Structures are given as C-alpha cells and as structure tokens.
Image (tube, rainbow, N blue to C red):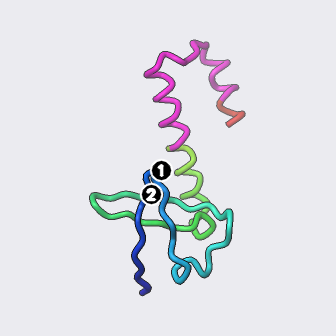
C-alpha cells in the first residue's frame, strides 16, 4: 500500500502526489466515492461496464432532479417521453 499526503486548494482541487499517480495518465477520468468520512478514488477504466453505466445513470438522474426542482422541466405525453429516453 502506498501512502502520501496532499491538500485541497481553495478551488477544491487536490493534487495526487507523483509517487501515487504512476499508472494514471493525463486526462484519465476518475470517480470519487464518499462514504461517511472516507473518500475512495478509482480510475473509471478499471470499473466494470455495468458500474460505469449505473454511475452515468445516477448522475443524469441527479441532474434531472435538480432541473425539476428549479422548474426547468417539460411536460410531455408518455409516447414522447419514451422516445426521448431512447436518445439517452
């Protein structure tokens, strides 16, 4: 197990120390999971396909809920709604 210390900037950015990021390339997407007081950082490329799809669905659902709370939603009939889901 490798351990290193880092800190968060005023903009919420965290630097992954060089000795820890040896196998992480520039531009690689990472997922941050928070459970209680523990943060877990994983490379998305290492996750199973279904897990990636679940995370994307959860993110889209959360974004849609926020838009709904702000009143930024559309009313549509069932047929139109199901058609728009296929585009996702």
Q: Residues within 10 Å of mark 2 (few under 14, many from 20)?
A: few
Numbered tag placed on residue 9 in the rendering = 2
The residue sitting at 70% across, 25% down in the picture is: 83
Q: Is residue 38 left or right of residue 76?
A: left
- Which corner quadrant holds the N terminus? bottom left
Percent position (x, y) of residue 77? 61, 13
- Give the structural element (helix, strand or loop) at label 2: loop
Q: Nearer the viewer, residue 76 or 16?
A: 16
Residue 17 against residue 78 in the figure, above or below: below
Percent position (x, y) of residue 33? 42, 59
For marks 1 and 2, give the CA distance: 5 Å
The residue sitting at 63% across, 67% down in the picture is: 45
- Give the structural element (helix, strand or loop) at label 1: loop
6 inside magenta stretch: no
Q: Nearer the viewer, residue 23 or 18?
A: 18
Residue located beneath label 1 in the image: 11
Which residues lie in the magenta part? 59-84
Percent position (x, y) of residue 25? 67, 72
């Amino acid at each position: 197990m490798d351990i290193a210390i880092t800190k968060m900037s005023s903009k919420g950015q965290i630097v992954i120390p060089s000795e820890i990021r040896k196998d992480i390339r520039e531009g690689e997407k990472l997922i941050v999971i928070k459970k209680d007081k523990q943060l877990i950082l994983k490379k998305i490329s290492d996750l199973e396909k279904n897990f990636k799809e679940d995370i994307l669905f959860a993110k889209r659902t959360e974004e849609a809920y926020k838009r709904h709370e702000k009143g930024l939603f559309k009313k549509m009939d069932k047929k139109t709604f199901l058609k728009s889901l296929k585009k996702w």
